[in-house]
Image: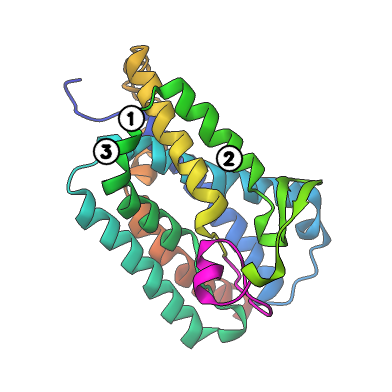
Amino acid sequence: MKSGRYFALDGIRGLALLNMIAYHAVWDLVYLFGFDLQWYQSESAYIWQQCICHTFIFLSGFCEPLGKKKLKRGVTVFSLGFLIVLATLIAMPQNRVRFGVLTLIGSCMLLMIPAEKVLRKCRPVYGLIFSITLFLLTRNINQGYLGFANWNLLPLPDNWYHNFVTTYLGFPMPGFHSTDYFSLLPWIFLYTAGYFTHRLFAHCKLLTHLESSKSKTLEWFGRHSLGLYMIHQPLLYFLFVAVLAL
């Protein structure tokens, strides 16, 4: 690939980023500015939110084999996640973020450095099936069960839900609250599903289909997604303050 870049991945990431900005804009209107938008509590809004986060996490895993300086990248993303924790704790403690999506993705990046030596030995198709199965099986562990959606297969022991360490792993302690909570389990399995999908694409020689450019605008947003993610909420807030002041 002459350009050294898969433009389709940038476009998908850019589309997810714009959706996330739109979703957070509605969140700001509801929770910071008191707008009564009943639709935001609907199943459709939840599906919208889930599609955004699933895309980001899966795509991060898909891009994992492409990255260079993986330790530096993982530490950077994890540190930015911690910065968001501090910023929300200071600026809006009632809506603070703890263990948000950047903390998760940074953790996955760092854990994949040693784990990839083992995962590389697994055939991509089996790894993908195994990752999806584990993701579905552990999807409800934040609520105290093994299972997915409305299917709670097995209750988990209450003493697993104990402190900040268990909360980080996926077993939130009593009274825990975060406006953006993505624990290591189950989401690391979605990340590894992306990783094995990339390997499957490479094995089947499908990566060339991701080389062509489709939308330069979306691709620009995708290439700058991390920086835009960090600044979009302050910009939205001040934009709404200015507009509502008029």
Rendered view: 3 above or below 144: above
On whether residue 233 falls in the magenta region, the answer is no
Q: Residues within 10 Å of mark 2 (few under 14, many from 20)?
A: many
Considering the whole magenta stretch, tell me its main secondary structure.
loop
Q: Is residue 74 toward the left or the right of residue 86 in the image? A: left
Q: Residue at x 66, y 72 (%)?
A: 159
Element on which disc 3 rests: helix
Rendered view: 75 above or below 221: below
Q: Amino acid at mark 2?
A: Leu
The CA span between labels 2 and 3 is 20 Å
Q: Which mark is residue 204?
A: none
Q: Amino acid at mark 3?
A: Lys
Please give the residue where the numbered disc 1 appears in the rendered image.
Answer: 7
Q: Where is residue 225 drawn, in percent x and y?
A: 37, 51
The CA span between labels 3 and 1 is 28 Å
In depth, the one of 37 and 117 nearer the eye is 117
On whether residue 178 falls in the magenta region, the answer is yes
> Between disc 2 and disc 3, whose residue precedes?
3
Q: Which residues are magenta?
A: 161-180
The CA span between labels 1 and 2 is 30 Å
Q: Residues within 10 Å of mark 1 (few under 14, many from 20)?
A: many
> Between disc 3 and disc 1, whose residue precedes?
1
Q: Residue at x 47, y 87 (%)?
A: 90
- Residue that lies at the very extreme toward the top in this rendered image: 204
